[in-house]
Image: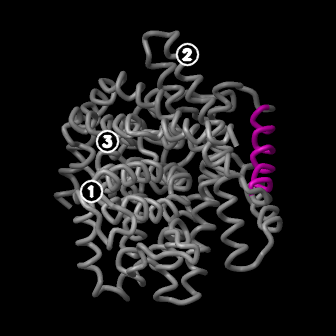
Amino acid sequence: MIFSEVLKNINDFVWGPVMLILLVGTGVFLMIRLKFRPLRNLGYALCQVFSKHSMKKSDNTDAGDISPFQSLMTALAATIGTGNIVGVATAMTLGGPGALFWMWISAIFGLATKYGESVLAVFYREKNSKGEMSGGPMFSIKNGFKVRWLGTILSIAFAVFAVIASFGIGNLTQINSISEAVLNTFSIPTWITGIVIAVLVGIVLLGGIKSIGNVSSKIVPFMAVFYAVGCLIIIIANVGNLPTGLGQIMESAFSSRSILGGVAGFTFATALRFGVARGVFSNEAGLGSAPIAAAAAKTDHPCRQGYINMTGTFFDTIIVCTLTGLAIACSGVLGTLAADGSLVTGASLTILAFDSTLGSLGSVIVTIGLILFAFSTILGWSYYGEKSLEFLIPSMKAKYIYRALFACAVFVGAITTLEIVWDFSDTANGLMAIPNLICLLVLSGVIVSQTKDFDDKFLQYEKRSRKKT
């Protein structure tokens, strides 16, 4: 009990106001230094995601292991997870409807953060002994910092935290959500779910990043569209409540008083806190995880992949999280009390929103969405953890041991209630951000210079060419 309480206090501190200010503040700083290019060029970035250069690895002779599209899908696989279903509902329960508004704000500045860390990942990436690309904050820090001893300490710290987080937030907590959802909806024992998912994960991991990229490029678009359609059905069915729902979101975002009858005491402060915290937790902008996938992309310039990878924040928060939030707001279930008098929150609240319109079919849709989201997150984070371990121990034997342990951890997470793991892994996830944010601030000049170089060599010409056609 004492250990659990200490861990919870540490986690509250790590994800407290100082960390949230640093995360959002770094995004604001980079957005200003880049003269709002990430926001101004968002349309260009979205076009790049679906361009021939991005989609076709075989037609791309640039250095790298997987296509730019597969790189983005691998990052999205790890990013779009339980946070898009559970996290949004929790934020709106604890912070009020206005939490969704502050998720949007954090995502806007998160574009610059995700762009910057991806640019650095490609710029400072290296080839390993097998000829595969390795990159991410640990390599950016090691190769970019002039003070070598500081770079060594921070790069090792990031890699250690990333390995721990891969087993926690990227594995145990995800499979735990899958097994519980499958048990509650389909009455399938958790051990069966654990075995099935562990085997599937093991099969994919055997092929490394190319296999993960191939699977992610197929499962991520499908799962996103599947879940989005479900949310749109809920929103359209309750379209009459949409103006009221949007009104509550905006009022709660800036309100100094409680709304919705005072059930949860929603105020500006709580909306801001939980909106930013859950937003960052969901899109991972600033945590330094997504750039590890960006470094594997076949690209002709770091900034091209930077623009492509930053759209992950847009897809995750502005699209998927917004759909979940609007479905909850329109259905009128926010503030519902459970039988024991507590507020319904998390996945249960999202399921309640779907059930209110679709009946029992709603539970099935949310559960399937949760399974796909969590499974893809496990795959994405397996790559992050493996590359971080490779940085610490450059050995193929260590890599194979990691893959075996990671697959076994899937089964353990499915059959065990791991309350301590949630706080422990959440803390490790947050601690990753510290060396990454320092890296972004110290090397912000490199990001700016690379962006100017890309503007001169590619961006302006490509924009003019698109206008002519």
Q: CA distance from mark 3 to mark 2?
A: 26 Å
Q: Position of residue 303 (x, y in %)?
A: 35, 38
Looking at the picture, tell me which residue is in the foreground, 419 or 160: 419
Q: Position of residue 225 (x, y in %)?
A: 47, 72
Does the magenta segment cover residue 405?
yes
Look at label 3 and name its amino acid. Ala
Of mark 1 and mark 3, the one earlier in the sequence is: 1
Vertical relation: 416 (above or below) 162 = below
Mark seen at residue 152: 2
Q: Secondary structure at mark 3?
A: helix
Of mark 3 and mark 2, the one earlier in the sequence is: 3
Q: Confirm or deny contact between disc 3 and disc 2 (CB under 8 A).
A: no
Mark seen at residue 419: none
Look at label 2 and name its amino acid. Thr
Q: Position of residue 436 (x, y in %)?
A: 46, 30
Looking at the picture, tell me which residue is in the foreground, 210 or 17: 17
Q: Nearer the viewer, mark 2 or mark 1?
A: 2
Q: Nearer the viewer, mark 1 or mark 3?
A: 3
Which residue matches tag 3?
Answer: 112
Looking at the picture, tell me which residue is in the foreground, 276 or 108: 276
Does the magenta segment cover residue 271?
no
Of mark 2 and mark 1, the one earlier in the sequence is: 1
Q: Position of residue 411 (x, y in %)?
A: 79, 56
For the record, the magenta segment spans: 398-413
Which residue matches tag 1?
Answer: 43
Looking at the picture, tell me which residue is in the foreground, 162 or 43: 162
Look at label 1 and name its amino acid. Gly
Q: CA distance from mark 1 to mark 3?
A: 14 Å
